[in-house]
Amino acid sequence: MKLRARRRTTSGEHTLAGAYAMDALSAPDRAAFERHLAGCEDCAQEIASLREATARLAAAAAVTPPPGFKERVLAAAIITRQEAPAESAAGAPAAGIPATGTPAAAPGLLDWLRWITRQGWRVRLAAAAGALVTVLVLGAAVVFGLANGSMRQQLDQAQSSSQQIAAVLTAQDAVMRTKAVFGGGTATIVMSHSRHALVFTAAGLHALPSSRSYELWLVGPAGDRPVGMVPAGSRGTTGPVIASGLRPGDHLVLTAEPAGGSSRPDMPMMLDVAL
Amino acid sequence: MTASDRPERGNPARHGEGAGPGADLAAQLGLVARGDAAAFEAVYEQVGPSVLGIVRRVIRDPAQSEEVAQDVLLEVWRTAFKFDASRGSALAWVMTLAHRRAVDRVRSVQKESERERRTATADIPYDEVTEAVESRLERERVRRCLGSLTVLQRESVTLAYYGGYTYGQVALLLGVPTGTVKTRMRDALIRLRDCLGVAV
């Protein structure tokens, strides 16, 4: 009797394999099934085989990405540090994966930049995301400069802010967001909560009359704080602007203000990004 | 017509899987794990359109889909070392990441959606979604295999996988007991797997 009941439970769990392989379990069901999965090698095998089928369902849904998507993905990868396997895992780490603890972001970033330069990517990226390139090149300059010291002098002017920018770009938790700006243009934000800072750039912003300028704000539970006026860049690009003092729950807001700036954000918001 | 409906698909499909693009993708992921940017671009070429496609199928909103698809591809870049060829194909690894992210976004988004709507951001203008040309054959094969399922099996799979619904929601939508939906889902995937010739 008892045995039968138990067997029924097990097979009951097992029928969830299809739903699980399609992510069709609610969060609690998923957690329960994963506990079951941990002790059931057969189930794991079955899930793996069912996922070969669902993968084909996904592949059949392929679409042609919009222009610039690929460039944004590759550019975002440049500034994203790769995770390394935990050393406690059985077996030696694969060759070439930088050991944890070293400033591993630097070699990865340098490799990327070398590769980009070789590929003529700088040009292609400039077309797609000009502003981001500014950030990358600036960030790279800092990394290079820190690496060999000789470029340091040239960076005196913008040193403090570019070091802040580089710190955000190379932060382990750096994430990039892009969002359309009301009235035209695209904003790109790289933020790091561990650094309490973000870097804002934009491309193709609608030109404002000379009496007005764009201003950035951090808006959130901690209050509305002005980040600063957004300088017009060259060739339709804007920034980079660094915003520090990032707090949990903040939004980044872009408004058009009188040229001298204002003490409170004016409506309408041209951009509102939850951070 | 009849000839093409015959179950002769096992072999060619598996053949394509063996040393073809699938194996190549796995090898590229190995290089990506070591920080090889060119390999990442190659991986993007192979899976980018599918990642965006499945994410968009589930999420619908183009801007959000793009954001989630980008996150998925970055996760591939960040965690390529986690791919284990002994536990399935590289395509399945990537698509599992993509589908789960999309579904999780859809289920967590209700709270946020109001705020999003209030935001005065313009929608990025999108041209009509273009189905990727390379996937036409794949789409045809999948369509054929979906056609070999019972109606209930097919609807369960479509609502769950492309619609992002839980099996409980699917049961409500189809007006059948949850137990039935669970078993239909599993049976359907087993049949699809066999029809597509993609056993591990």
Image (spheres, rainbow, N blue to C red):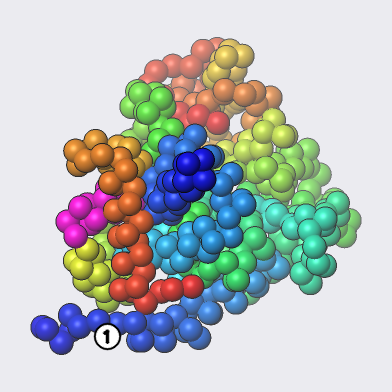
> Magenta segment, which residues?
B150-165
In the structure shown, which secondary structural element does the residue marked by tag 1 occupy?
loop
Specify the quadrant of the image occupied by residue A93.
bottom right
| Of the pair A171 and A242, the residue shown nearer to us | A171
Queried whether the magenta region covers residue B152, the answer comes back as yes
Q: For the residue carrying disc 1, how many other residues have a C-alpha within 10 Å: few (<14), some (14-19), or many (20+)? A: few
Q: Residue A6 placed where, x, y %?
A: 51, 44
**A135 lies left or right of A51:** right
Would residue A236 appear left or right of A34 to someone viewing this image?
A: left
Is A195 in front, or is A204?
A195
Residue drawn at 39 percent across, 54 percent down = A18
Q: Which residue is mark 1?
A: B8
Residue A236 appears anywhere in the view = no
Toward the viewer: B24 or A176? B24
Quarter-of-image position of residue B151: bottom left
The outermost residue toward the right is A149
Quick check: A211 above or below B22? above
Residue A7, x across and y down, in percent: 48, 48
Main secondary structure of the magenta stretch = helix
> Quarter holding the C terminus of chain A?
top right
Residue drawn at (35%, 86%) of the image: B12
Q: Quadrant of residue B111?
A: top left
- Which residue lies at the image location 50% right of the left edge and 54% below the top edge? B97
Residue at 65% across / 60% down in the picture?
Answer: B82
Q: Position of residue B41 (x, y in %)?
A: 54, 69
Q: Name the subunit of mark 1.
A: B
Considering every residue shown, the one lying at the far left of the view is B1
Q: Is residue B81 magenta?
A: no
Q: Is residue A274 above or below residue A77?
A: above
Can residue A91 be seen here? yes
Instruction: Please state which amino acid type lies under the numbered disc 1.
Output: Glu
